[in-house]
Image (tube, helix red, strand yellow):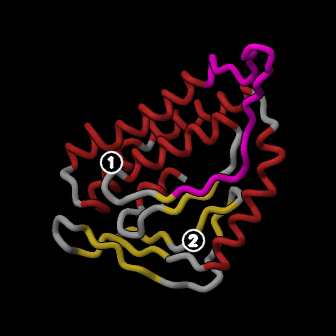
Amino acid sequence: MRRFTQFYVNGNWIDPVTPNSFDVTNPADETIAGVISLGSKSDVDKAVVAARNAFTPFSRFSRQERLELLESILITYNKYYDEIALAISDEMGAPLSFSIEDQASCGTGHLQAAINALKNFQFEENNGNTRVYKEPIGVCAFITPWNWPINQITCKVAPAIATGCTMLLKPSEIAPFSAYLFS
């Protein structure tokens, strides 16, 4: 049984301000697949402060630094691909073959798409007499659904990293395992 009772904040696993355990049920067989902690307002506040503090230095990362980070994430994702697929099966009750072939593969696709887009993205361009600058906007807050968990995580997180934004990710409490592994 999986046990994920900490939150990933500012590069560290931390305990919740107020522990609030939640059983995650595998809908395929209705067994308890694991336990997580639900976050509180205080946990969100801590994460927002950390993401905001990280934003200024991270937003100044060069294109090359962001590419290297995304490529590193993709390598790590592929290293744990089978474990991610199994987690998806456990959290949403999907057959393992579906998790391997369709669910987990979305993650690699979104990460690679962000890498490809970033390689040639024009952060500055002329538009008539106007110069347009595309800059990181700030801290992004992402909430993901239960039914395509890693797909929605990677299609939000990868572009945020590519553009230099920090983020908070709140996965569905009924399908949280792949988010923990992605962290």
Residue carrying label 1: 85
Q: In front here: 34 or 28?
A: 28
Left or right of 133: which side holds 146?
left
Q: In front here: 164 or 177?
A: 164
Which percent across, then down, holds residue 163?
67, 35
Magenta-highlighted residues: 118-142
Rendered residue at 37%/38% (across/down): 106
**Amino acid at dot 1:** Ala
**Residue 52: in magenta span:** no
Rendered residue at 22%/60% (across/down): 93
Which percent across, then down, holds residue 17?
65, 82
Residue carrying label 2: 6
Residue that protrudes farthest toward the front in the picture: 129
| Label 1: which secondary element | helix
Q: In this view, does 35 lie above or below 135?
A: below
**Residue 130: in magenta span:** yes
Q: How far apart are marks 2 and 1 (CA)?
A: 21 Å
Left or right of 133: which side holds 115?
left
Quadrant position of the N terminus in the picture: bottom left
User: For residue 118, which quarter of the picture?
Assistant: top right
**Amino acid at dot 2:** Gln
Which percent across, then down, holds residue 46?
72, 71
Q: State yes or no: discs 2 and 1 in contact (Cβ < 8 Å).
A: no
Q: How crowded is mark 2: few (under 14 residues within 10 Å), some or many (20 or more)?
A: some
Q: In front here: 2 or 118?
A: 118
Q: Is residue 118 above or below residue 103?
A: above
Rendered residue at 56%/84% (across/down): 19
Left or right of 66: which side holds 20?
left
